[in-house]
Image (cartoon, rainbow, N blue to C red):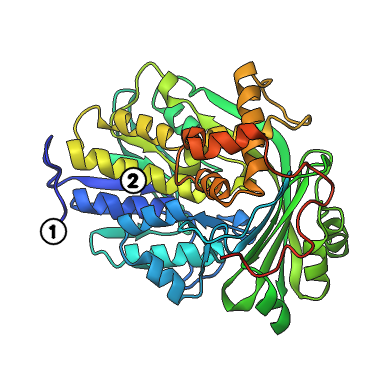
Amino acid sequence: MPTRPGRGSDTVGQHGLVLGGGFAGMLTAQVLAQYMDSVTVVERDVPPDGPEPRKGLPQARQSHLLMGAGARTVEELLPGTLAAWAEAGAHLLGAPGDVAFLTKFGWLPRVWHEEFVVSCGRDLLDWVVRREVLRNPRVRLLPHTEVEGLVGDAERVTGARVRERGTGRSTTVGASLVVAATGRSSHVETWLAGIGLPAVPDEVIDAGTAYATRLFRPSPEQHRRTPGIVMIANVTGDATGGVLLPLEDGRWSATVIGMRGSEPPADDDAFLDFTKRLPHPALAELLADAAPLGPSRGFRRLVNRRLRFDRLPRHPDGFVALGDAACVLNPSHAHGMTVAAFGVAALRDLLRRYGNIPGVAGRVQRAVTRAAETAWQLSVGDDLRHPSVIGPRLSAAARAQNAYADRVTRAATTDPAVARSLVDVIALARPATSLAAPRVLVPALLGRGRRATGHPGPADPLAPRDA
C-alpha cells in the first residue's frame, strides 16, 4: 500500500507522470509510487537490461562520482541500493582516506573519516536504480517515447503529449502531477511556453569547461598500490586538472579537464600528452604503465545553468522540474547526481506533509532550488575565479568568501580536522557555513599550511593513508 500524506488532500486515484527515465526520473517514480496509485515514466530511449550505455546520456562515458550525502539520500528513497551497487561492483571509498587529492596548496592528508563516495560507471548506477524501481507494480515504463509538450494552461498542468518514436503515434497521458527529469537537454522552457507561461529566467555561468575521458586496465601491482581515487585540481593557473577513478571489473576511468583556451584534445595520443601538462605527474605516470581500453571521448559545452522558477509570476500547479532539468552544474565538481537526489527527497518531504494539494508544486519547486543552492554556490564561486569565464564579475562578498576558502584549504593540507571539515562541505554533507566553526576558523586564520607551488605535497602522494 502507498504511504499517504499526514495531512492535505488524499491521493487515492491520483496518477504521477515522470518525464525522463534516468537517475533522477527513476528516483522520482519511486517517490510518487508511495503517494499515488500509479506512475508512468516516459523515456525516449529503450533502457538496456544491464549496466550498458544509454543513447540519451552521452556524458555517461565521462567519470562520475556520487557523493556520500547523495548515496545516503538514495538509500533513504530506495532502501537496499547501496548494497546492490556494491554487489554489482561499485566501490564505496572513504574520503579523504581513499582519495589522493591535490589542492592548490598541497595534498590533503589521507586520514580516516566517515564520509565516503561511490565510484563506478554511470551505467551501473542508473541500472541498479532502474531495476529496483521497475520492480514496483505501481510504476509503468513507456520506452522509446518522447515528450511533445505539456497539457493544461498557465494555471495547472494536467498531463503531457507524447509520441511513440517507432510508429509516430501521438497520445495524451493525463496526470495529477507531472515531474520533468529530462536532464541537461530538457525542453522545459519550451513546454511551459506552449501552455501560456512567460519565459523562465535563467542564470548561466560558463567557464568553458571541457572533458576527455579514456578507460584503462591497470596492472595488478598498480591496482594494489594506488589509492581508490587520484584527483588533481588546477594549481598552476593553466586551468587544467585530472581525475582517476576505479570502476567495476578492475578498470580505471581517467578524465582530463580544461577550461576555455586549455581544452583537452580528443585524439588518443594527445590524451596521454595532456596528462603530462597537469600540475603533478602522478596521473601521467600511472597511465603510462596501464593498458588503454578503447578511444578517448570528449564532452564540451559544460556550463552552470539554473532556471529561476521563483521569478515567474506564478508557478503552475501540477508541474515540477528537478535534477539537470532545473539546475545544471559544472560536472567537474561531481555534484550533479547528489543534487538530483536532494531534489527528489524535497519532493518526497512535501508530498508526505501536504499531499498533492493546490500550491504544493510551487512549494516543491522552491525546495528543489534550495536543495541545489550549496552546490550552485560552490561551483559558481570556483568557476568565476577563472579569467575565461562568461558570467557576472565576482562581488566583493564573493571575493572575501573565496579568500577565506583558500585559507581553509591551505590549513587543510596539514590539519586533519580541517581536512575532514573541508571534505564534508565539498561532499555536500554539511553547509559551507560549517567552515566558520572554531575548529576550522582558528587554523585558517592562523595561516597554517603549505604555500602554493607547482608540485606541492609529499614525495609519494600515493602512499598508504594515515591512521
Q: In which quarter of the image is residue 1?
A: bottom left
Q: How far apart are marks 2 and 1 (CA)?
A: 20 Å
Q: Residue at x 31, y 56 (%)?
A: 76
Amino acid, disc 1: Met
In the picture provided, is 78 more to the left or to the right than 70? left
Q: Residue 1 carries which label?
A: 1
Along the line of sight, the residue nearer the viewer: 40 or 368: 368
Q: Quadrant of the C terminus?
A: bottom right
Instruction: Kindly identify the residue that appears in the image at 86 percent across and 53 percent down.
Output: 277
- Residue 355 appears anywhere in the view: no
Which residue is labeled 2 in the image? 345
Image coordinates for residue 22, horizontal then vertical, percent: 46, 55
Q: Is residue 118 left or right of residue 229?
A: left
Instruction: Report the disc number at residue 27.
Output: none
Instruction: Please tell me in which quadrant of the rendered image residue 138 appears.
Output: bottom left
Snapshot quadrant of residue 26: bottom left
